[in-house]
Image (cartoon, rainbow, N blue to C red):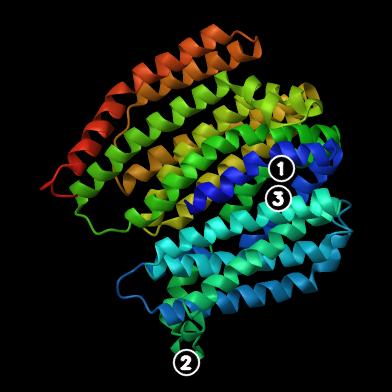
């Protein structure tokens, strides 16, 4: 519920945003928010990932974990303030540096309190806080954009206030001040947390390069108006990310359960087969409906952005599959592999953007993103077998990719019926996995069944 609420808001409010912000304003706003999202893990030094990972362990010292997280976030924000003059030299950030600093701080505090709540087992409260944050962002956006006409400032400030109030709610409700204890700090645990999270910092930078660099390339090579249209087209792929995000929120709690080797491999393999089916079929359905979604999603001036949606969806689908194999590295505390595989994709993405955007425009950026994510997926799927042998069907994946690429071409040609046929073919390809999931779900509901 928490994941769905916050992410679906981005999609549902897009028609509102595009009606009150011009293409250029939306492009600048999107770049500022994405720059903030890039700075968030850098400022926290990735420690928030360690707060959740180590906080979930049965014998963890939550006081040490929380205190370490809070101190690192505070120190990182202080360093960001010292280097803030550099941000003012970036043309798009010069008038919004203070808001950017607040956005990063409140987002980190919200994540710290949210991860701590999950680690303490208060998942229901975490979900409620997510819904509250969603409602606050929606209400404040409408107030600041349509009533006070605050434009870019109002958009960012809405997120700052919502994150801050939600973090405060969790902090007070769970009396987290009791977890802050300097005497509880232990060098061994802190060292383990940093060994786990530090490789994730450059990995996050590389992920940001893949996700966001295309918008910077487009802004400076073509214009912020095209970047804004491209960003809105990416909201269609956000639907797929919403579903994947719901899965990931539950999955990251499940992968840490203790299982024997063979049982662990079977568990990962079974879940992946169903996850793959949902992601690829979902991508196919959204491709077929991309023109219709774009018509209802944004103002008419943004409509031509639907041309970018099919390739962006294809790249997002492969990215979702690659993130699954990244969970193997999380479960085995082998985060350095996440860094290496993401670095390969980031370098590929930068090269692709530099070569393809000047020749093909924004569609070239979408193609570069797809190729980079495909490379990450293949690298992780092959390498992760050294740690955990997750079984997956190569022929099934290849056939699915061929069908999706064919659908990309058909959608671009505005051939609706053949596109729908491609969706049906994807369902047939993955039908065994879907039937297995349905059967397993029904059996789980029967009385007397042992839960695995």
| Position of residue 428 measured from the top left corner of the image (x, y, whole percent) | 35, 17
Where does the image place residue 49, in percent across and percent down from the top left? 49, 63
- Residue that numbered label 3 is attached to: 34
Is 232 placed above or below 156 here?
Answer: above
For image coordinates 34% across by 23% down, the residue present is: 430
In this view, 51 is above or below 335: below
On the image, the x and y values in percent for residue 433 come to 29, 28
Which of labels 1 and 2 is toward the front?
2
Image-based side of 380 in relation to 388, left or right: right
CA gap, disc 1 to disc 2? 43 Å
Kindly report which numbered mark, 3 or 1, lies closer to the viewer in this rendering. 3
Residue 52 placement, left or right of 40:
left
Residue nearest the observer in this picture, 214 or 290: 290
Q: Is residue 196 visible?
A: no
| Residue designated by label 2 | 183
Mark 1–mark 2 CB contact (< 8 Å): no
The residue singled out by tag 1 in the image is 213
Circle nearer the N terminus (1, 2): 2
Residue ID at (25%, 38%): 441
Q: Indicate the secondary structure of the residue bearing disc 1.
A: helix
Quadrant in the picture for residue 88: bottom right
Q: Which mark is residue 127?
A: none
Is tag 3's residue or tag 2's residue first in the polypeptide sequence?
3
The answer to whether one can see residue 122 in this image is yes
* Residue 424 % position (x, y): 42, 15
Can you tell which quarter of the image residue 325 is in? top left
Q: Secondary structure at mark 3?
A: helix
């Amino acid at each position: 519920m928490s994941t769905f609420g916050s992410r679906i808001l981005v999609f549902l409010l897009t028609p509102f945003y595009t009606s009150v912000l011009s293409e250029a304003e939306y492009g600048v706003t999107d770049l500022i928010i994405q720059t903030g999202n890039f700075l968030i893990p850098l400022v926290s030094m990735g420690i928030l990932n360690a707060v959740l990972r180590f906080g979930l362990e049965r014998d963890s010292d939550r006081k040490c974990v929380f205190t370490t997280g809070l101190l690192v976030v505070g120190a990182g924000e202080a360093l960001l303030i010292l280097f803030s003059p550099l941000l003012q030299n970036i043309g798009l950030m010069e008038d919004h540096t203070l808001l950017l600093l607040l956005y990063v701080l409140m987002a980190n505090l919200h994540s710290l309190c949210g991860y701590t709540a999950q680690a303490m087992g208060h998942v229901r409260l975490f979900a409620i806080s997510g819904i509250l944050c969603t409602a606050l962002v929606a209400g404040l956006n409408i107030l600041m954009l349509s009533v006070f006409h605050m434009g870019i400032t109002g958009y960012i400030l809405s997120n700052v206030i919502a994150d801050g109030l939600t973090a405060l709610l969790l902090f007070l409700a769970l009396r987290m001040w009791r977890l802050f204890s300097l005497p509880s700090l232990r060098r061994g645990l802190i060292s383990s947390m940093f060994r786990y999270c530090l490789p994730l910092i450059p990995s996050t930078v590389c992920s940001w390069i893949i996700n966001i660099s295309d918008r910077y390339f487009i802004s400076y090579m073509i214009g912020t108006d095209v970047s804004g249209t491209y960003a809105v087209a990416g909201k269609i792929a956000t639907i797929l990310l919403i579903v994947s995000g719901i899965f990931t929120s539950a999955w990251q709690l499940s992968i840490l359960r203790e299982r024997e080797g063979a049982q662990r491999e079977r568990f990962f393999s079974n879940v992946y087969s169903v996850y793959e089916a949902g992601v690829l079929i979902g991508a196919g359905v959204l491709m077929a409906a991309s023109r219709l979604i774009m018509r209802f999603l944004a103002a008419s001036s943004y409509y031509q952005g639907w041309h970018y949606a099919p390739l962006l969806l294809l790249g997002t689908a492969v990215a979702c599959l690659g993130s699954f194999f990244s969970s193997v590295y999380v479960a085995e505390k082998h985060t350095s592999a996440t860094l290496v595989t993401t670095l390969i994709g980031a370098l590929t993405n930068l090269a692709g953007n530099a070569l393809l955007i000047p020749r093909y425009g924004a569609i070239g950026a979408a193609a570069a993103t797809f190729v980079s994510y495909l490379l990450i997926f293949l690298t992780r799927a092959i390498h992760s077998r050294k740690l955990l042998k997750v079984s997956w069907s190569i022929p099934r994946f290849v056939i699915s990719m061929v069908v999706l690429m064919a659908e990309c071409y058909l959608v671009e040609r505005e051939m609706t019926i053949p596109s729908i046929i491609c969706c049906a073919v994807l369902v047939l390809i993955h039908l065994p996995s879907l039937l297995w999931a349905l059967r397993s779900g029904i059996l789980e509901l029967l009385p007397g069944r042992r839960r695995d």
